[in-house]
């Protein structure tokens, strides 16, 4: 601590660099500094990190504009999660950030419940999809649209089978196939 007895600045010899993926393998010498990059391993016997904006490189040394504070800017391995801690609660719907978190914690595989597979279709010769031209006696299929929107926030994979004509054989065939390939079949129409 003797070199830090007075007020800054402090001139300290540079011992090397520690890069992410290429750490300095020697312990830090007393009253020396190592240039360390974000994500790099802090060398053994290091007790503080001074951010680059508060330093100046001069030949084979570095000038510190501030007094180092023990443990400042150092994040120990495992500081963000303790051994045995729950990473995500059961029932969490996994999104991109959840998957990134699991990966950052080293999880290669997780047990998941697959999305419910839902088949959705409307029936009716009078129905048309929005955006098409309506003929006499025809209407737009708003029910299939609103059902899709109501279900969107649920853990469901929706297979939109469209509009079926009022043909019993077509409806029966579609219902049978949908029941084989899906967990739930939802229809709108008469």
Image (cartoon, rainbow, N blue to C red):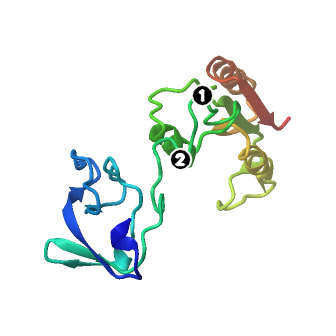
Disc 1: which residue: 84
Categorize mark 2 by other alpha carbons within 10 Å: few (<14), some (14-19), many (20+). Answer: few
Where residue 90 sits in the image (x, y, percent)?
69, 30
SS category of the residue bearing label 1: loop
Seen at 60% across and 28% down, the residue is 84
Between 78 and 184, the residue placed more toward the observer is: 78
Tell me the quarter of the image containing the C terminus.
top right
Between 180 and 29, the residue placed more toward the observer is: 29
Mark 2 and mark 1: Cα distance apart in space: 23 Å
Q: Hey, which residue is sitting farthest left in the picture?
A: 59
Tell me the quarter of the image containing the N terminus.
bottom left
Disc 2: which residue: 96
Figure quadrant of residue 133: bottom right
Seen at 60% across and 36% down, the residue is 87
Seen at 61% across and 21% down, the residue is 181
Between 61 and 142, the residue placed more toward the observer is: 61
Q: How many marks?
A: 2
- Foreground label between 2 and 1: 1
When the figure is inspected, residue 112 is found, relative to residue 15, above or below; the finding is above
Where residue 102 sits in the image (x, y, percent)?
51, 38
Between 19 and 183, the residue placed more toward the observer is: 19
Where residue 2 sits in the image (x, y, percent)?
35, 68
SS category of the residue bearing label 2: helix
């Amino acid at each position: 601590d003797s070199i830090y007895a007075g007020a800054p600045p402090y001139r300290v010899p540079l011992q090397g660099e520690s890069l992410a993926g290429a750490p300095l393998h020697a312990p830090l010498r007393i009253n020396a500094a190592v240039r360390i990059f974000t994500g790099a391993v802090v060398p053994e016997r290091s007790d503080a990190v001074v951010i680059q904006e508060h330093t100046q490189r001069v030949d084979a040394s570095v000038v510190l504009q501030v007094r180092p504070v023990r443990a400042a800017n150092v994040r120990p391995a495992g500081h963000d999660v303790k051994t045995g801690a729950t990473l995500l609660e059961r029932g969490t719907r996994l999104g991109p950030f959840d998957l990134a978190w699991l990966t950052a914690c080293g999880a290669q595989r997780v047990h998941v419940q697959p999305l419910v597979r839902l088949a959705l279709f409307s029936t009716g010769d009078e129905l048309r999809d929005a955006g098409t031209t309506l003929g006499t006696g025809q209407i737009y299929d708003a029910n299939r649209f609103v059902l899709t929107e109501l279900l969107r926030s649920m853990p469901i994979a929706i297979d939109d089978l469209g509009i079926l004509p009022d043909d019993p054989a077509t409806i029966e065939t579609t219902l049978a196939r949908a029941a084989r390939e899906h967990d739930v079949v939802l229809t709108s129409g008469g």
